[in-house]
Each structure stands twice: as C-alpha cells, then as structure tokens.
Image (spheres, rainbow, N blue to C red):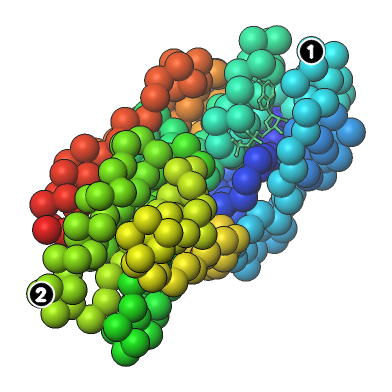
Amino acid sequence: MKKIAVLTSGGDSPGMNAAIRAVVRKGIYSGLEVYGVYQGYAGLMEGNLKKLDLGSVGDIIHRGGTILYSARSEEFKKDESQAKAIEHLRHLGIEGLVVIGGDGSYRGAAKLTEKGFPCVCLPGTIDNDIAGTDYTIGFDTALNTVISSIDKIRDTATSHDRAFIIEVMGRHAGDIALFSGLAVGAESIIIPERPFEIEDIVQKLHKGIERGKKHSIIVLAEGVCTGNELSKLLVDQYQIETHVSVLGHMQRGGSPTGLDRILASRLGARAVELLVEGKSGRAIGMQKQEIVDHSINRILNQKDPLSEGVYTLSQQLSI
Ligand code: ADP
C-alpha cells in the first residue's frame, strides 16, 4: 500500500483534527502518501482530494471542528455515487480510506468496503453511541463543556432559589445527559433509553424543597422532549416553575480535552496500521484501555449498551 486517504463525515466532534493529524503523521511515518478528502462523502463524489504533508496538520491538535470539513450527503447513499467515489480514489492510486464519523458514516464506509474499496472507521461523535468502544472521540470534551455550563447555571440557580431544566444533546443516546448529570449531582436525569415518570421528578423537587435545598437541576436529553415542553408540563399540571436552558451547538465545539486528543491519536495511528496490514471493513475503538477493532457490520448491528452502572449510581446518589 502506497497511498491512503482520510475524511470526516456527519456531525463534527472535538478531536477529529487530532485524529486526522494522527492518520497523516503515522501514514507518512510508515512511508505512505496521505490524501485529505474535503467535505466528507460529498467531497469524495466530487473528487475533492488534496495530498497532505506533515505541515498541513501542524497546529491543529488543539482545535475543535475539522480542517477537512464535514458534510451530509443523501446522494452518496446511491450505488452509482459510491462507485463514482471509488473511481476518484483509484484514479489517484489510493488504496485505503479512513472514515472518521458516526454510525451514518460507518454505513457509508461499509458500502465502499462491500464494493471492494478497503475502509476503516474511527468513532467521531460527541454522542458516545457507537458500539465496540468505551468512548467516542469528542464525548469527553462535550461532557466537560456541559459540566462547566451547568456549574455556572447552578451558581445562579442557588442565588435565586430556582429549579433549572438543562436540555443537552442526544437524540437517541443519553450518555451526555447521564454522565453530566452524575458529574453535577443533578436531581433528575431524563434519557431516551429509560421511560420517565413525571411524578418521580415532582417528588424529587418537593423533597429537595423540604430539605431546604437552594436549587434543583434536571438534565434532559433532547431526544425525550424539549426543555420547554417539560417545563410547561410541570407548571400546568403541578404548578412548579422551572427555568429552561438549552445548551445547543456549543456542545459540539471547543478545544478537545486531553483524553479526546489521546484517544484520537491512538485510534488514528491504529487505522493506518490496519490498512498497512491489509485489513479492511474494521471499526476501531478503545475498550478497557486497549485499542481494538471489530467488523464495521457487526458494530452497526449492535446497540451501544447504556452504562447501567452509571445509571444506577446516578439514581442512588440523587435521592
Ligand atoms: P453520522 O456519521 O454523524 O451518524 P449521518 O447519519 O448524517 O452522520 O451520516 C453521514 C453521511 O454518511 C450521510 O450524509 C451519508 O452520506 C452517509 N451515509 C449514511 N447512511 C448511509 C448508508 N446507508 N449508505 C451509504 N452512505 C450512508
């Protein structure tokens, strides 16, 4: 193998740049030429590729976002679009592709691999919703962003004796809500993976007031309902006033944490090794501190398990 390429796709996440850097530098270290594909699969279909050198990934390890940009493309789901993408890669003599993204991006990589083009995937998403890895690249940074935001809100919540609903990202996966909720000592954590009873939340709010608590924090994953919907329910049915804070896209940005930079660097380097070893269709992750790889198709058919221990603990500590 002489040439490989790397792309970022789907929702961006902090640490994608560190992963790109690792792929490029490990690739060059291993004697390969490395190409960057701009704008994800959309750019791949257009042949938007550029050779990257050591300097092109300098000064990016600490930056959020992705220097290769990301995109979503419905067009790429068509067989003929995937064939066109492979043509562009082969035309440049590229023999392997590293895809950094979420499960949608993994599906695209699985299709290219099926059509005979070797791909390996890295989990780049703040949602921590990919099976076969304990953490995804960007989750730790997003978690810390949420924690520091809630800590600030808690200051004002305490001063004014208020209950706050904090709406965080996570349409299908509640990890950001669950982990941040545990880390800030939230009274209630509401996530898509578990049914929630409004009475439990009301009871906790009342109990807190009885104990003389100055504030209450409810962390809500956006996939359950909006913060405003929950707030309306509480005021209409239980006459409980809450303030709502929607954290939004700030959760996807920012300088990656040390853990995300190291995870991205380790996984990125492993991606190059796998391609050099002639392996393809692999999804790389870290489990119990070890770098591992599984078949992409297996990962796509597996549901990422909710961290049961963390959920149970959050329940036990928020009594
Ligand atoms: P993420 O990778 O963050 O989950 P998306 O679900 O938007 O983000 O997927 C990113 C891109 O991956 C899509 O815009 C599309 O180009 C490609 N993709 C998603 N699903 C498929 C599929 N079934 N077949 C081929 N490509 C796909």
Residue 157: quarter of image? bottom left
The residue under the point 84% across, 29% down is: 45
Disc assigned to residue 211 = 2
Position of the C terminus, as image quadrant, is bottom left
Secondary structure, mark 2, is loop
Q: Which residue is mark 1?
A: 79
Q: Quick check: can you spot residue 131?
A: yes
- Above or below residue 168? Residue 270 is above
Residue 298 on image: x %, y % = 44, 16
Residue type indicated by callout 2: Arg
- Above or below residue 142? Residue 49 is above
Residue 187 on image: x %, y % = 23, 62
Residue 186 on image: x %, y % = 26, 63
Ligand 1 lies under 8 Å from the Cβ of mark 2: no
The residue under the point 87% across, 34% down is: 47
The answer to which of 215 and 311 lies nearer the viewer is 215
Residue 62: quarter of image? bottom right
> Disc 1 versus disc 2: distance between alpha carbons?
62 Å
Position of the N terminus, as image quadrant, is top right
Residue 314 in the figure: left or right of residue 279 = left
The answer to which of 78 and 314 lies nearer the viewer is 314
The residue under the point 19% across, 57% down is: 203
Q: Please state which of the two labelled residues, at mark 1 or mark 2, is closer to the viewer.
A: 2
Residue 254 on image: x %, y % = 55, 67
The residue under the point 42% across, 59% down is: 236
Residue 206 in the figure: left or right of residue 146 = left
Q: Quick check: can you spot residue 144?
A: no
